[in-house]
Amino acid sequence: MTDLWTITEDAFEAAKQHHQETIFTLGNGYLSTRGAFEEGRPGDRRTTFIHGVFDAAPIVFTELANAPDWLPFTVHLNGERFSLDAGVVESFTRALDLRTGTLSRAVRWRSPAGLAATIAFERFASLADPHLLFIRCKVRPEFAGFVEFRASLNGNADNEGLAHWHRVGQGAEARPDARSATAYLHCRTRRSRIGWAGAMRLVGVAGRRLSAAWWDAENTPTLTLKMKAAPGRTLIVDKRVAVFTSRDLPEDQIVQAAMDRVNSVTDWPAALKDHAEAWAKEWERTDVVIEGDDEAQIAIRFNLFQMLIAAPRHDDRVSIGAKTLSGFGYRGHAFWDTEVFMLPLFTYTAPHIARNLLNYRYRNLPGARAKAKANGVEGAQFPWESADTGEEVTPTWLPHFADRAKLVRIWTGDIEIHISADVAYAAYQYWRLTGDDEWFIEKGAELVLDTAKFWGARAEWNAEAGRYEYNDVIGPDEYHEHVDNNAYTNCMAQWNLQTALDTLEWLRGRAPTKAAELAEELSLTPSALARWREVIEKVHLHVEPSGLIEQFEGYFQRKDVDLAVLEPRTRSAQEIFGIEGCNETQALKQPDVLMLQYLLRDYYSDEAVRVNYDYYNPRTDHTYGSSLGPSIMAIMACDVGQPDHAYEHFIRAVRADLRDVRGNAGDGIHAASAGGTWQAVVFGFGGLRISPEGWRANPRLPKHWKRLAFKFFHRGRLQEVDVK
């Protein structure tokens, strides 16, 4: 029977090393560690990223600092170091158990001198206690002599050559039993001055101990344990690590906190049991069951797992970046991806996590207001890329993808402004589903009102045409820059303004004191509200008599291209036509109009959706364009009664990382795609719809699916949909 909870690898392929490191990432919502080998390998990307631990970096302003490495754990057979690059690898297996969040690997290895042994590693980042990390090593020797285990904390981690840490101190304390020591390392980021402390123990579980030692190697404190080797007798050694930062506690307390926490661990079985029970609770509300399609089943669970290990459960000062915590891509920065593609999963299955993510935006309103002010407008303009402070951190220039000697101007941070409406939309949808009036009154309403204030100020009056416009923008489709009156941007601005008016009216009835307070703080005068109403009424949108919406002004006059004739290909339309050339075509990175109709589905008739789907679907670069598009396209294909198209889009989305569809999964997980796959299943195939009256499901399963089951919270109560 196929195991539908385990991602497996039966042979190590060096060419796929970085991709597999991403796939085998582990995490617990506090930190994530890529699937690099404990013993190391040349060219690996060994990263552990901790939420909120940013440091200054050139070009990208700030980036998540690759934390000191807790993984190093080497095995030496009669003095010969185990390595996949030496000796003979006679068998290799690696497995990620999604159900319990554990990663295991077993290698039968013969050393250059001919010594044979089976060496197995298992590790997990505790979901029960996010500060605890565990590795267990088992060695079954086929020779007599000794096996030495060496475990380290390595403070020499960097971000692809950029060092963010300097050592503050290190040391070791003997345990009361005198059979082991606890070693620690204390580091600090160079510019943001965030402290990090790690403490570790090396514990012999099975086998005869010969000696133990503590090596005070600079910036790499190391514990060693030498054990007697006998043919067929398995040796077991555990490495236990605890990590704290000065974001958790005052820095003068973090070393002792790490020491105390790692010393409090009783044994591996108890820690693993607590961890597995925590995962069981996560899956109880989050799992999606698909019968009749094994690939879809394990793939959706993999995508959900990647979302769950990145989700901040105990910190509302952080968000989830576009690559989660799984790689260097996008430097840990958060985009609209979080609110539109990831947040619905948590809003529906883990509202406490969704609230944390929204609180991150609320906390960063000052940064959004500063950005708007710098651009000469009022209100809150959220940055296209956001990190720890909520200031804009989109790079201005980046190397050209085709010629690294050339630079490309990056305009998204300047003119991709729709993110402000996306944040408001996410806040409103959270409130609509959960009924969390207290949060909406205290925080959510302000997000909606202050972003509306931005849209009211940003609207430009075209006296000749008698309309309001939003000019020189970029919509979600980033193949087209510097466009006027992008349909998605204009309609989401209109929605934001109207929702703000409705919110203010609701507040006046339910929380009049708060309404008066916000009206005064945000200068929501009668004249300001009158302008909002005028913009709502007169904002420009080009709709053909058929119901076809023009993506932006002049789009229909751009050169039409038949993307089908370019197949087979391995490059995006932008790579084929060039940045400027693609901008002059109708080829889409993702279809803005369909994204708009998905978010505001109640505003459009079935026929209007069908007309726009038929037009924009063939013009979209589905495989090599945006990873954000396929999941939404699957939902829209379901909406227009094309289940075959829907499944094609869906399977493309769930394969994005597992099969490295775009060839860049080594940079980290495509988080928006991962979050979007849940929406494709629940809102597309499951047909879930929420209204003020309640919820309903209109399932539209692929013909080979035999069952679809999922759960979600509606107004605090767990609901279940089970379609057979």
Image (cartoon, rainbow, N blue to C red):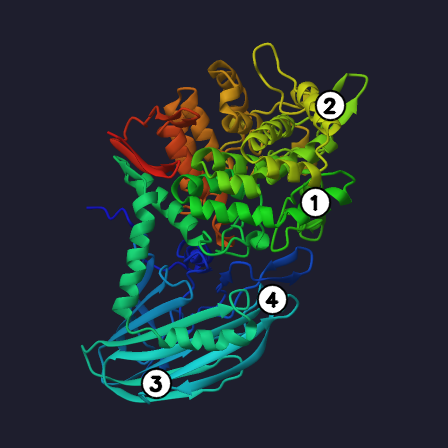
For marks 4 and 2, give the CA distance.
48 Å
- Extreme residue toward the right, this view: 464
Name the kind of residue labelled 2 in the image: Tyr
Name the kind of residue labelled 4 in the image: Gly
Residue 294, image x and y in percent? Answer: 28, 40
In which image quadrant can residue 707 be found? Answer: top left
Question: For mark 4, does the 10 Å Cα neighbourhood hold few (<14), some (14 to 19), or many (20 or more) residues?
Answer: few
For marks 2 and 3, give the CA distance.
72 Å
Residue 355, image x and y in percent? Answer: 48, 46
Which residue matches tag 3? 180
Is residue 178 shown left or right of residue 425? left
User: Is 711 situated above or below 89?
Assistant: above
Callout 1 secondary element: helix
For marks 1 and 3, give the CA distance.
54 Å
User: Is 136 situated above or below 525?
Assistant: below
For marks 4 and 1, give the CA distance.
35 Å
In this view, the residue in front, 518 or 122, is: 518
CB atoms of marks 2 and 3 within 8 Å: no
- State the mark number for residue 369: 1
Quadrant of the drawing holding the C terminus: top left
Which residue matches tag 2? 468
Looking at the image, is mark 4 or mark 2 nearer the viewer? 2
Which residue matches tag 4? 161
Name the kind of residue labelled 3 in the image: Ser
Which of the marked residues, 4 or 3, is nearer the chain's N terminus? Answer: 4
Question: For mark 1, does the 10 Å Cα neighbourhood hold few (<14), some (14 to 19), or many (20 or more) residues?
Answer: many
Is residue 191 shown left or right of residue 246? right
